[in-house]
Image (cartoon, grey):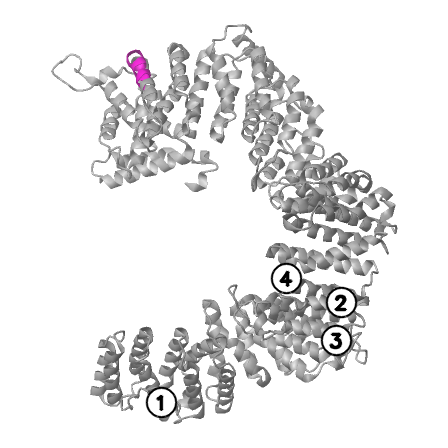
Amino acid sequence: MDRYQEQPHLLDPHLEWMLNMLLEMIRNEKSPPLMVHLCFKFLYIISKVRGYKIFMQLFPHEVSDVQPVLDLLCRQDPKDTETWETRYILLLWLSMTCLIPFDLSRLDGHLSTDPGLNRESTMDRILAVAKSFLRVSDKSRDAASVLVSKFVTRPDVKQKRLGDFLDWCLTTISQTSEVTMEGTVTLDGALQSLAQLFKHGKRDDFLQYAPTVLQCLNQKRIAESNQATLRKLGVKVVQRLGLTFLKPRLAKWRYQRGSRSLAVNLAQSSVTESVEATKLDLESVSQEEDYDIPEEVENIIEQLLVGLKDKETIVRWSSAKGIGRVTGRLPKQLADDVVESVLECFSFQETDNAWHGGCLALAELGRRGLLLPSRLSDVVPLIIKALTYDEKRGACSLGSNVRDAACYVCWAFARAYEPNELKPYVNQIASALVIATVFDRNITCRKAASVNILSPQGTFPHGIDILTAADYFTVGNLNNCYLTISVYIAGFEEYTKPLIDHLVAMKVNHWDGVIRELATKGLHNLTIQAPEYMANTVLPQLLPMATGMDLHRRHGAILACAEITHALYELATQNNSWVTDFLSSDTIEGLKNIHQKVCRISLLGFGGELMRPAVCCLIEKLSLSKMPFKADPVITGWQWLIDDSLKNLHLFSTLMGVFLGVHILLSINCLFTSICCHTDQLVSQYLLALESPEVLTRCGCALALGSLPPFMILGKLQKIFPGLQAACKVVQKAASLTEARRDAATAMSQVCVAVGVCAQGSPDRVLCESNIRPVYEALLGCMNDYSTDSRGDVGAWVRAAAMSSLMDVTLLVVASAPELLSSDLVQRMMCCLAQQAAEKIDRYRAHAGTVFLRMLHSTDPAVPHIPHREELLSIFPLETGTSLNWNAASQAFPHITQLLRLHQYQYHTLLGLTVSVGGLTESTVRYSSQSLFEYLKGIQQDATVLQQFGDTLLRIFRDNLRNDRVSVPLLKMVDQILANGCFDLFASEESHPFCVELLAICKEEIKKSKDVQKLLSCIAVFCGMVQFKGDVREKVLVQLLMLLCHPFPVIRKTTASQVYEMLLTYDDVVDDDQVLTDVMASLSDTNWESDIATVRTHRNQLCDWLGVPRPILVTKVTHLGD
């Protein structure tokens, strides 16, 4: 059924057979109760999708159906929460059976003539059922109100029970308190039934009761209730009372556009005649304009107008519909007074709720032809204001619902009025809708405005072209709207200035920083459409804003000045002119003075977080635009701001500090590149700041050195390189300075690229033979940075930066002086890249793999001295550069494990694979281990190659002894290798050197260790090493039996469990079957988590059975002085 929610009418051909099939099972006496309830549940689902009004018409409503349905409903338990669907459907069914055209007394038989029968009449039973279900808290209450509206309005019931039922409703309302949940539910049922009765009943029957009902509601003050549902129902009842007081007539003064019949409008030959006939018919309905209006109507309209300002949308929407309905029955003068009252909702003293309600009411009045064209001159300006309504409230804004409702008003007006009626306003409406389409912050409003672009029947300027570019789906992307679609629409002259003016007036000072920045970038892109307007009108407007007191306005205006100036420069460059040709001298002076005026206001604290990046952006753009500020004192001020910001980065929040740092670097590069401002102390100042204890200051100064133009670096390389190299090193005290090391590595390559390469050049001016090795040593050292903190493997940031820097420097050197690259540097670099390409983090593995292939496949010229180049090219053909997805473990590891065949790559590749195979990520472990075992399967019969692999494995273990990052995954990997029988060749030889060495390193690794994970991994390795014969097996058993008395209970328990499994796997460990049985029984039956003394007894017994010497507890000896 869910598929039919949007177009439920598609179900109509199938409703009857589905209903009959389910009712057949319900009527079957053999159907179990659960089956019956399930059928009712299915009926409810269908009715929910199609709507109960349509669905209930299909229920059988013969006379014979009344009693069975009523009896079944009476047998239901209203408190059963599992079967409410059954009660809901039965009430709807009973509502249909009540429509039989016979007096209900005929169904009672001899009830009235035989006083001996105390049975209730059918009429009373149905009323009692309806009243009882009006008090329940589930969906059945809604169906009960429908039942009341159908039943009580029957001619026979109306005569006997209408007054009593209304008395019951009013008594219930007046005596019930909404404080309790039960009271709220009861009020809800009574108000629903009143609303349904006054909606479906005849006016003549209910007019006499209307004043009493209104008086009761006024006394109850439903509008002041805390429950939104009750306020909505109160509005519904009030509007129905208003329609009861007023005669049902169609006002002849209302605006009419054609016929209300689609068929008539589509019949081209008889359109005019049909319209005239319709107008004549309407005039015959209402011949008199003047008639008496009851006093109560004024009270009703006042309540509906108050409802327009309610805090809940459902109440405002109901009030708007009520105003539309009631106004349609009023004389022209009174109706105009209602319109005037609605327009008062659009005062700036009113809340967003009033604006939203006012928009909904105007749309309803317009749809019904009750808003005459003479009023459009008052209404259209208010709707245009509503389309841009946005009010900041705390950390968020209000008004998206107002803008959405304003779009609905435009939609309604486009369908209510002839195009020539809207023609005077179409340009205003079109501009406002286009602005909402591309610049509204809320995606719903953008889509709603986009839908309206073609509404005014072809009168919308360039409507089809705009809708093609800004359709319902395209406007979903906010960046695309601001930066692309707006530029296309601004190409049409009617929209150019309105779009620009809106950005300057409403978006540059927006409370959301993202919108402000997008607005300034949008102004940059729109400058090409109106450069003169930008230079002569917009910039003079922005300059006072850029130095004003409002923080958000100041921030946005500074960014906008920067972007527009740079856009004018780009346009001037295309025309071989200068940016000053566009700008007046006052504007140039104003741009220059922004920095000084802002410094006087505030650059520290909260304001500084916004203003410093903005002013740095201004410096960047003005520098790029080659403004005539050379040798001007303002340059000194800019330099001071940049230096001060670098020193104080740590005073800002981390994200804002990073953001500010980016703007500083851009401004440094642009300022010193375009404006020759040489400061001798600048480099020394940045180098000194590299030793700052603040990490962000180090980051900023490192990247600042990398951003300096070449002429400022020349002659200072012998200071810069050592400073950056020192910043790259991991010092124990500075372990937390990871970001600084990352940025130092990045800066090193930027400096190298800036100065260039010359083999025999000066080491103080270029990258040459004298200084290239320290650069590579520093970057290769960064490749071994595995620092961790609470954020995880933060050293990966340094390694990634080092990989990028190595690639940039290497390709730079290869292009100019490849002879500078020695074979050992290239080998170490390629091996480190291979190691990173085999590790576990997908993102960094992919980066390493990409750099590795870039080096390997470089041909113009090729990187020299790459070890095993031909074999590497066979493993990684040229096409793998684009086809191989390094992020996918399933693709990366089958390739990277082939490097194990190459001697010079084996150590580093296996080191990288170790942390992947012994890692935690399931997919990484699975594919890396599969690839490793495929390689081992191919060499396990080749003693020489297997010995070489074993030696490499042991060397990695020795080099990383007690380095938990490697040793724990390595133990897990060795366990898997042993379990897969990859070292069976060594097992056939007693006390093979590999086994002896592996056991010795494992013992050393876990000596005095309290790391549970490491101990558990080592237990698994020991159990796997039992397959090796000779002295190794006995020593392994000693280690396992010692672990049976480990201080940690979990270690003892796990050891016993794994030894048990090991004895089952390797049946040659114990030759005597009886001993084996005793050992197995002891391992399984002993509680290894009990105290050490008890456990030691059992352990010693196991030593005796296995023929292993009992471990002796070593006592500590204290040496006393003489």
Q: Mainly helix, strand or loop, the magenta region?
A: helix
**3D distance between C-alphas at marks 2 and 3:** 25 Å
Identify the mark at residue 683; answer none if there is no mark. Answer: 2
Question: Which residue type carries mark 3?
Answer: Val
The amino acid on which the numbered mark 4 sits, given as a three-letter code, is: Leu
Q: Under tag 4, what secondary structure?
A: helix
* CB under 8 Å between discs 4 and 2: no
* Vertical relation: 1039 (above or below) 778: below
Q: Secondary structure at mark 3?
A: helix
Q: Nearer the viewer, mark 4 or mark 1?
A: 4
Compared with residue 840, is residue 95 higher up or lower down, i.e. above or below?
above
Instruction: Read off the residue under disc 3.
Output: 813
Pick whichever of labels 2 and 3 is earlier in the sequence.
Answer: 2
Q: Going by the image, does 563 lie left or right of 946?
A: right
Does residue 209 lie above or below 40 as drawn? above
The residue at the point 32 percent across, 21 percent down is: 175
Tag 1 residue: 1035
Q: Earlier in the sequence, mark 4 or mark 2?
A: 2
Using the numbered discs, state the Cα–Cα distance from disc 1 to disc 3 in whole angstroms: 55 Å
Which mark sits nearer the N-terminus, 2 or 1? 2
Q: Would you say the residues marked 4 and 1 are in contact, meaning their CB atoms lie under 8 Å apart? A: no
Disc 2 on helix, strand or loop?
Answer: helix
Label 4 Cα crowd, 10 Å radius (few <14 / some 14-19 / many 20+): many
Residue density around tag 2, few if under 14, some if 14–19, many if 20 or more, within 10 Å: some
Q: Is residue 925 magenta?
A: no
Q: Quadrant of residue 508?
A: top right
Q: Which residue does the image show at 38% across and 34% down from the upper left?
A: 47
Label 3: how many Cα within 10 Å (few below 14, some 14–19, many 20+):
many
Task: Identify the residue position indicated by label 4 in the image.
Answer: 696
Residues at discs 1 and 3 in contact (Cβ within 8 Å)? no
